[in-house]
Image: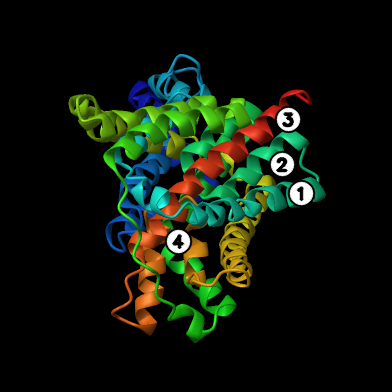
């Protein structure tokens, strides 16, 4: 009888119920909120649902040494997480993004690319803010990239500069990407008048097929000569776009924008979520990162809008300043937000196509920003 009681006592002590504390409960609740937002509110469901469930997976208390936890070197989750820590997953996602992206709106009016560049101010101002709060330069660089509103880029740079911060930075970046429809509209309306929001854009010129094929080659060379450290991301982005535009490689383009990116998104979301293990994730620094991330996103949105207003001082054909908010690289959500806010003033004003120009240039801009930060910080590590 005593043996049975001992076995039952040991069994109970080995369960997650016995090993859990309040920190795991907090993280599990956060994971459930992510799943709710992804399914019920449809906020970036392809990201929030895997990350949310990953948070649940990572916060089941387990014994160390059994090869179950994501931070144990002999666990399955640890092997899958290698794609995050080694920076393997982000370039593959960029390959798929390139194969899905149509750069013709940007090529039709290259001036709008400046809005994508202006929105990257969020990266560098957040970098300075993180330094002021006492983060090491390499950690500040990784935190700053949240301002680019580009999850894969944030993960890639953090893996290189501050692997210890991958969990909070990745979750912050993807959280704010998902909350684009909530965060951006108030900033956009605060910084623009009704007359500015009513501005109609001129129809863009038609971009030839030849231009679309030449662009990924020329764009790759120019961008990577400017920021060689961005090569893994931009190389895959432009390669994916070349596969799409070349037509003769349509099978490869279809694989890149479907099977490859979908598989990698599942693994990336699940393992990033699982990396938020309560005893590792719930720290004061994580709270600071979330605060800085919110500030970065707000600054990036405001910078794009303000720069569009400055451009209008010198242009005869005015730009709707709402387009500046699309300069953050949350593709295509920030462009959709521009369309929505614009149509609240005038339901017949269609800005989506025009907003895609700064939106896709923002993807390029955030990757270049990451490359610049990496090249500066590499000598300090």
Q: In the image, is residue 338 above or below residue 15?
A: below
Q: In the image, is residue 275 above or below residue 34?
A: above
Depth check: 37 or 17 in front?
Answer: 37
Q: Earlier in the sequence, mark 3 or mark 4?
A: 4
**Residue occupied by mark 4:** 180
Would you say 105 lies left or right of 120 here? left
Asked if one can make out residue 14 in the rendered structure from this viewpoint, the answer is no
Distance (Cα) linking label 4 and label 1: 23 Å
Q: Residue placed at 57% from the left, 43% from the top?
A: 169
Distance (Cα) linking label 3 and label 1: 13 Å
Q: Earlier in the sequence, mark 1 or mark 2?
A: 1
Quadrant of the rendered structure where residue 204 is? Answer: bottom left
SS type, badge 2: helix
**Residue occupied by mark 1:** 128
**Residue occupied by mark 2:** 140
- Report crowding for label 1: few under 14, some 14 to 19, many 20 or more residues within 10 A (C-alpha): some
- Report crowding for label 4: few under 14, some 14 to 19, many 20 or more residues within 10 A (C-alpha): many
Q: In the image, is residue 258 above or below residue 185?
A: above
């Amino acid at each position: 009888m005593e043996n049975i009681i001992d076995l039952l006592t040991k069994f109970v002590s080995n369960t997650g119920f016995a090993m859990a504390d309040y920190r795991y409960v907090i993280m599990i609740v956060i994971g459930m909120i992510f799943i709710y937002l992804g399914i019920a509110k449809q906020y970036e469901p392809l990201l929030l649902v895997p990350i949310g469930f990953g948070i649940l997976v990572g916060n089941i208390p387990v014994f160390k040494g059994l090869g179950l936890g994501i931070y144990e070197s002999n666990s399955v989750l640890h092997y899958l997480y290698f794609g995050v820590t080694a920076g393997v997953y982000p370039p593959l996602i960029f390959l798929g993004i390139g194969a899905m992206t149509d750069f013709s709106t940007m090529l039709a009016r290259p001036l709008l690319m400046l809005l994508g560049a202006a929105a990257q101010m969020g990266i560098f101002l957040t970098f300075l803010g993180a330094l002021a709060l006492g983060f090491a330069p390499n950690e500040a660089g990784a935190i700053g990239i949240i301002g680019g509103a580009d999850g894969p880029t944030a993960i890639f740079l953090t893996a290189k500069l501050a692997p210890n911060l991958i969990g909070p930075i990745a979750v912050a970046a993807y959280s704010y990407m998902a909350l684009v429809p909530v965060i951006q509209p108030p900033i956009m309306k605060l910084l623009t008048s009704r007359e500015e929001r009513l501005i109609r854009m001129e129809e863009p010129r038609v971009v030839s097929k030849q231009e679309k094929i030449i662009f990924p080659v020329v764009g790759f060379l120019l961008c990577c000569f400017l920021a060689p450290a961005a090569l893994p991301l931009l190389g895959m982005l432009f390669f994916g776009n070349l596969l799409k535009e070349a037509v003769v490689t349509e099978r490869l383009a279809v694989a890149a924008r479907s099977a490859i990116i979908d598989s990698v998104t599942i693994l990336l979301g699940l393992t990033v979520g699982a990396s938020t293990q309560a005893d590792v994730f719930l720290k004061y620094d994580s709270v600071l990162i979330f605060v800085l991330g919110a500030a970065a996103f707000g600054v990036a949105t405001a910078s794009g809008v303000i720069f569009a207003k400055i451009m209008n001082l010198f242009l005869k054909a005015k730009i709707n300043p709402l387009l500046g908010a699309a300069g953050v690289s949350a593709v295509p959500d920030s462009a959709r937000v521009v369309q929505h806010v614009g149509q609240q003033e005038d339901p017949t004003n269609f800005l989506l196509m025009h907003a895609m120009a700064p939106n896709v240039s923002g993807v390029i801009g955030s990757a270049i920003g990451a490359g610049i930060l990496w090249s500066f910080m590499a000598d300090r590590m």
